[in-house]
Amino acid sequence: MTAAVLSIGTELTRGELTNSNASWLSEQLTALGCEVCEHVSVPDDLDRIGAALKRLAAEHRWIVATGGLGPTTDDLTAEAVARVAGVERVRHEPSLRMIERRFAAVGREMSPSNAKQADLPEGADPLENPVGTAPGFAVTIGDCRAWFLPGVPHEMKRLFGDHVQPAVSRGVERDTHQVHLRTFGLPESKVGELLEGVEARFEGLTLGYRASFPEIEVKLLARAESEAAAQAVAREAEEEVRRRLGDAVFGSGEERYPAYVGHVLRDRGLTIALAESCTGGIVGSLITDVPGSSEYMLLSAVTYSNAAKTEVLGVSGEVLRGHGAVSSEVAAAMADGARRLADSDLAVSITGIAGPGGGTESKPVGTVFIGVARRGRETVTQVHALGGDRWRIRRLSAYLALRELVRAAKAS
C-alpha cells in the first residue's frame, strides 16, 4: 500500500529549514511495510495545501502531514483540511483543556491565540499531544486516511508513535523486512563497490545508502511473499554484507558511532581522557552526547594554544619548539598528559591543521596527528592526511580519534 508525506510550511519551501521530518517519517513508514512514493512540500497557503491534499488522497492509501498546527496566522492546516472535507472547524473542548493544562504546568497563562489550536475540522479524530500545545488530528478523505501532526520534531515523533504507527501496523499486510547497518571507515563509493552484486544475489532485495558524514548507513529492504520470508532474505543478505564490509560495520538500527564507542568502553570497564586542539572539543561533545558517558569519561581538555598545552597537559616547551604543535611528539605528550591528569585507563589526543590556512609544504592543511596513551603501555601516534573543508577535517579527525579509542580498548 502506498503512502505520501506532506510537509506544510513556507520555511520549508524557501529552504529556511531542513526538512528532517519527511526523511524520518519515510523511514518509519517503510519499516512498517508501506511503499512511500512521494514527499511533497507546500507553503502556508490554503489553496496549495488543499490542492496537494486532494491529489495525494486520490493516489495513496495513507498521508502523514506535518506542520501548520500552531497558534499564528500562517498556521492554516486545520482550515485547509476542513475546506477539503467540506466541513466547518469546531472547537474541541478536551484539546482546549489540554492546552490550558500545558501552560499552567509551566506557570503561564494561555494566550487567546493558542485556543485556535483546538479548532479542528468537524468529524476529525483528535490526537492527544502530551509533549506540546498543538493537538494533531486524523481524517478520512475518500479511501485515504490522513494524519496531521505538529512540525516540531519531538512532538511529531511522539504523536506518530502513539497514533499513526499502531493504525498503519493494523492496516498493512506485511511482506517486507528492513535491516539497517551502520558503518564507519569506508567512503560511500567504496561501500558501494564492495556490495556490488548483492542485490542480484538475493531475490527481492533492495540496497539503499545514506551518508551522515563520516558514517554510512546501509539499508537492506527485502520483499517476499510473507514477512517471515522477507526477514529470512534480509538476514541472509545481512550476513553477506557484514562479511564484505568487515569491521567497518559497527552496529545496526539507530545507534551512532559514539554510542558504540561507549558500549565498548563500558563492557570492558575502561575509563578515558581526551586532549583536543584542532577539533576544539568535538570528541568530548560526541562522547557526552551519549547518556551514561560519565561511567567512562573522566576528562576533556581543549588545549588550543601552546600555552594551554604546556600549563594544562605538561607538554614541554622544548618539544613544542623543536617539533611544532602539529607533530607526533606533541600528540604523544598531550595524550600522556591527559591520561596522567585523569588517571584514566586510556587517553586520546588530536593536534592538526584544519585550515583553510596554516598549512606548509611539509605539513599541509589536513595534516592531523592522533596520540593514544594506555596505562602500562607505550604511547603511540599516527598521522593522517585528510581532505575537505575545515568542518570535514575536524569532524573526521574526531571520529578517527574515537576509532583509536575502540582499538585501544579492544587491545587492552
Image (spheres, rainbow, N blue to C red):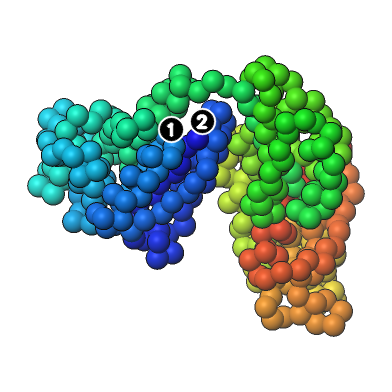
Which element is circle 1 on?
loop
Residue 203 in view in this figure: yes
Viewer-closest of 58 and 210: 58
Describe residue 94's horizontal placement relative to residue 238 as left or right: left
Residue 247, how many percent across, how many down? 83, 40
Q: Residue at x 45, y 26 (%)?
A: 168
Residue 209, how many percent across, how many down? 69, 47
Residue 142, how many percent across, how many down? 32, 32
Describe residue 119's horizontal placement relative to residue 369 as left or right: left
Q: Residue at x 40, y 65 (%)?
A: 14
- Quick one: which residue is furthest to the left in this view? 112
Q: Residue 337 is drawn in which quadrant?
A: bottom right
Describe residue 294's horizontal placement relative to residue 263 as left or right: left
Describe residue 344's horizontal placement relative to residue 31 as left or right: right
**Label 1, label 2: how far apart the Cα atoms are:** 6 Å
Local packing at callout 1 (Cα closer than 10 Å; few below 14, some 14-19, many 20+) is: many
Q: Residue at x 62, y 56 (%)?
A: 282
Q: Residue 159 is drawn in which quadrant?
A: top left
Q: Which residue is mark 2?
A: 1
Viewer-closest of 379 and 237: 237
Task: Examine the rendered structure and indicate whether residue 106 appears above or below residue 49.
Answer: above
Q: Residue at x 12, y 36 (%)?
A: 90
Task: Examine the rendered structure and indicate whether residue 91 appears above or below residue 172.
Answer: below
* Amino acid at circle 1: Arg
Residue 349, how many percent across, how many down? 74, 57
Which disc, if any, is residue 304? Answer: none
C-beta proximity under 8 Å, tags 1 and 2: yes
Count up the numbered dots: 2
- Quick one: which residue is furthest to the right in this view? 378
Q: Which residue is mark 1?
A: 61
Which element is circle 2 on?
loop
